[in-house]
Image (cartoon, rainbow, N blue to C red):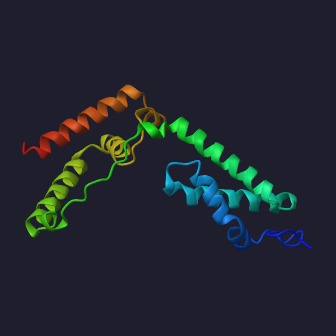
Amino acid sequence: MDAPGQARRGEGVDAELLARQFGPALARFFSKRVKEQHDIDDLVQDVFVRLVRKVNTDGSHIVAGYVFQTAQSVLNDWLRKRQVRQVSAHDEIEPELPDLKDDSTPERVLLGKQSLEKATAAVLELPEVTRTIFLLRRLEGMRYADIARRLRMPISTIEKHMARAVAHLEMRLNGKP
């Protein structure tokens, strides 16, 4: 006879049975130890993931003590991550969604398209190397050192090309010929 939550050796774990048997108890376990109630379901899920991996790799039986030993390990890892990231020092930000009615007027859409066309034309006016450097930096988010390595140029040359590109775009987008 197999242990609850354990199928025959080699067949793996019945995760559904585990969830029914231990899910509520694990949720209570974490709710007593974690302030962030929205993280409890993730922690319970992590326990099941670890149990399934463990049983599938070594064929051991799952017993209640092992479930809560795993839960404690998951909790310790979670707390360690929080401490490293200093989560308690962060303020939660709820971004204000723009009023889409005001932002999507035909005039605003037309102005946006015209600005984009003007910016695209200004970028296309740049010499090829300068344009490539500008696009790698601004669109791809690459660092100067990475661009320099990729294009086999000194970093100072990359910086000069970026300065030229920015000056050109500033001049063209601010209405100067």
Which one is nearer the viewer's eye here, 112 or 148? 112
Residue 157 percent across, percent down from the top left: 36, 29
Residue at 16% across, 40% down: 170
Which picture quadrant has residue 110?
bottom left
Q: Is residue 23 left or right of residue 89?
A: right
Specify the farthest residue to the right.
Answer: 1
Residue at 55% across, 48% down: 34
Residue at 61% across, 60% down: 27
Which one is nearer the viewer's eye here, 141 or 161? 141
Which one is nearer the viewer's eye here, 165 or 21? 21
Residue at 70% across, 73% down: 16
Quadrant of image for the N terminus: bottom right
Residue 75 percent across, percent down from the top left: 64, 47
The vertical placement of 29 against 86, above or below, is below
Residue 109 percent across, percent down from the top left: 14, 65
The vertical placement of 52 against 70, above or below, is below
**Numbered label tally:** 0
Specify the farthest residue to the top.
Answer: 156
Q: In this view, does 89 lie to the left or right of 114?
A: right
Residue 57 percent across, percent down from the top left: 83, 58
Which picture quadrant has residue 166?
top left
Q: Is residue 160 left or right of residue 41?
A: left
Quadrant of image for the C terminus: top left
